[in-house]
Amino acid sequence: MATIAFLPETDGINTVAAQVTLSATPLVITPPSESVRWVTHVASQLASTAEPLVLVFHGETSVHAPAIGFSRRSLRRPAVGYVLIDPVMPTIGGDYGDWPDAPVTVVITDSADESAKEASLQSRLRGWKVTTDLPQEVLSAL
């Protein structure tokens, strides 16, 4: 069974983590201090766990999904899934190769801005699952 890992937002803890109740205890990554880069901090925090992870991104930090996925693969512990909530669309290819390396679910909430709604259209074109279900429902089903 995979562990849900809530990655921090740009300005603090992942706010979705406090809004959902899961049967298993999730991994909640702390936000970096201002002197540490987001990707470096999150990758080093995740490196300490060997269990299969579903990585949960919220908002702007979704653009870092390929970099975090690459860091997991380099440890030979790839992610088993990605959940992008109201995302800014990550770039495919480039420095991170063939991302995504696991299924991607995009969740669009009622509070999503226009860029997240546009991201849902791109996601459908890429064959990713797109839903307007509540994050609680999506994460509980994993």
Image: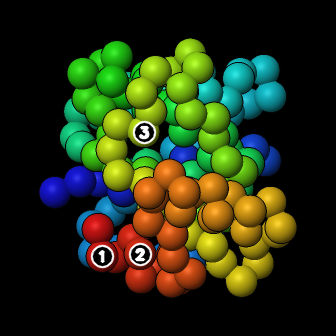
Label count reads 3
103 shown above or below 23: above
Label 3 and label 2: CA atoms lie apart by 19 Å
* Residue annotated with mark 3: 100
Task: Return the x and y of residue 140 as percentages of the image width and height.
Answer: 34, 76
Task: Return the x and y of residue 3 as percentages of the image width and height.
Answer: 29, 54
- 89 left or right, relative to 73: right
Identify the element where label 1 is drawn.
Answer: loop
Identify the element where label 2 is drawn.
Answer: helix
Q: Quadrant of residue 47?
A: top left
* Residue annotated with mark 1: 141
60 shown above or below 96: below
Q: Residue 138 shows which numbered tag?
A: 2
Q: Report if the CB atoms under discs 3 and 2 are less than 8 Å apart.
A: no
For residue 89, say whether it is visible: yes
- 57 left or right, relative to 36: left
- The amino acid type, in three-letter code, at marker 2 is Val
